[in-house]
Image (spheres, grey):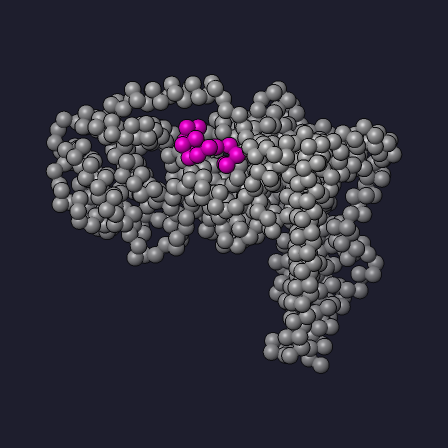
Amino acid sequence: MEYAIDAAQRTVLFWDVMRQRGNQYREHMAEAVPNVLSYEAELIVDGRTLERPVNYGLVRIVPPDGVTVDPRRRPFVIVDPRAGHGPGIGGFKADSEVGVIFKAGHPCYFVGFLPEPMPGQTIEDIARAEAIFLEKVIALHPDADGKPGVIGNCQGGWAVMMLAALRPELFGPIVIAGSPLSYWAGVHGKNPMRYSGGLLGGSWLTALTSDLGVGKFDGAWLVQNFENQNPANTLWTKQYNVYSKVDTEAPRYLGFERYWGGHVNLNADEIQFIVDELFIGNKLAAAMIKTSDGTAVDLRNISSPIVVFCSKGDNITPPQQALDWILDLYDDVDDIRSHGQTIVYTIHDKIRHLGIFVSGSVAKKEHGEFASNIDLLDTLPPGLYEAVFEPKTDSAAGADLVTGDWLMRCEMRTLDDIRSLGGNDAADERRFATAARVSEINLTLYRTFAQPIVRALATAPLADTLRQMHPLRIQYEAFSNANPFMAPIAGLAEEVRKNRRPVAPDNPFVAMQENVSEQIVAALDGWRDFAEALAERTFLTVYGSPALQAAVGIDPSDARPLRKPAKNRLYQELLQKRIAELKSHIALGGLREAVIRALIYVGLGRGAVDERGFESLRRLRGRYEDIPLSEFKALVREQFFILLVDTDAALAALPSMLPADLETPRKAFDLVKQIMSACGPLSSEDNERMQRIARAFGVDEPSAMVRNLTVVASDRQEAHAKAS
């Protein structure tokens, strides 16, 4: 009886939550600028007023009471995804990307958008607008210590990367979170969303949907794609969590549903570009996308550090889709270095796609560390790194040099580390290339024979009706106050709250309820697994057919990479000139260059850059010679490349770079020793490299090279005083 009363009350309260959800949806969609930002925002640039108007805008996030930002610190700009939902997910709550940026003391800006696109706007128009936004941010912060750090969430990530390839001078470090850049990539048996384009016959359905929308594509269809990836959660778990925990779960559920139900539209040209060029064509990683003036979008042109944040638990953007563009563009790490690029990646073990943007724990850990260590990321020598996070402990060496609750270390990696995650073989590449060709053929057939008829029959009232009748919109509208049958629910719910009698947790019927729920989830998961396995087998069989491949112009026996970007002869010539220039600079420089060269040489033996060492160096840099960060970054890169070009000659030149007096080289060596020991005890290889530096600096201290060089806080203060 207790369970029956509780279940009846929970049923009433559940439907009242659904009613609130529907009303919230209607109110949200009626707003002039619907978003889910939990911060006050000030409009800076309205994209609708630009020469090529777009429905995007740049806003400044106003720091809340009690938060102080330093205008001299580089600003951050967050670009949210326009993937069917409205903007604001980057500042959804206090523990968010916006929150950790403010905590680190940086100004914060946000690029959002309106539900309806401007007539005729294209992806290229949006890129131009975002370039204007960044120019404005740079102009507002002329004294900042670096160009803006830019965070691109999900599909905002590829948009940021495309713009950075075209306008690299506008960017500081770029963080792309959960962003797909290599759309064909993946492993068999997992994440079959990449097969969808081929199974649907290509992008002709996209064109049909846009034509039925009279030139607009309903973003609810994109949200539907996300929903289809996890039917158990979509059809059961989300609602069951509300029903089973209705006394506490409603605020969290309603907060998320406000974002999930904020559907937006795209122009036909926008979505067609996204599907043809990116999702099915996979042209971004192969440098095959061109702007209207013929400029190739080549990600190798990006000069800013790139931070890739992905997760093994993300079924929308698995690690392969987030990282395999690196394999497409580069032959090895030296190829990355030759382009002057710094790429840092980190892979979460289990967080799902949306958790990358909305999880409080992720915001406080990964995003918090990226924000607080943005200068470290900006000055990392070119190469490929993995960001590793360890909990901060007071007993660890240099704990006072760690600003947050986590210690970030960037460890050097090779392309084999990315390959070890799994990916496509040559046969898979041919299958996806075949699907892309079939898509082109079907789209041409549709445009030739069906599109004129569809466009002639489609009208604006029909398009509005189709949008309103979309299943995702119906589920909100049907349970709002617009439905007269929901009218009694509010009153009943109020009476239930006055007389609420929750059942005891140990009631046996509660256990039975949980058991039934688990069986429903298991059944839906089983259906999903069956459907995904069938979809994968169908795709592999159909597009793996040698006959189909040959028919569309793909050589079934070709084992070469199909989408490898071309090498640029001019670039190779410039590279050789740069190497010759570096060799001529080996003996140039003074004490500052010598110290940086020594630090890099010893650090290369570790194969990692620790935030403690950088923080120690930063404090000393600010205390004794506060050179601009851009100049310091250029200095680090110059000395790093000199060491790569000719290590022996670079070290042999150190004595000529040092002052002639005896005291200064000794102080410089102590400084190198102090910074290197800030991260803990030196290894045997560290000691060997330190010995070589000691000989180059003319320091006769062999015993100091053998003992453990761990420096505690008091020793470090003494070293500061000695250096002074």
Residue 356 percent coordinates (x, y): 54, 49
Residue 333 percent coordinates (x, y): 42, 35
- Is residue 695 visible to the viewer in this orientation of the structure? yes
Quarter of the image where the C terminus is located: top left
Answer with left or right where residue 92 lies relative to residue 493.
left
Residue 644 percent coordinates (x, y): 33, 30
Q: Nearer the viewer, residue 505 or 552?
A: 552
Task: Specify whether residue 327 is painted magenta.
Answer: yes
Q: Residue at point 65% right, 67% down?
A: 518
Q: Main secondary structure of the magenta part?
A: helix
Answer with left or right where residue 120 lies relative to residue 180.
right
Task: Specify whether residue 451 is painted magenta.
Answer: no
Q: Residue at point 52% right, 41% down?
A: 323
* Residue located farthest toward the bottom when viewing the structure as drawn: 1
Residue 100 vertical placement versus 127 (above, below): below
Quadrant of residue 622 in the image? Answer: top left
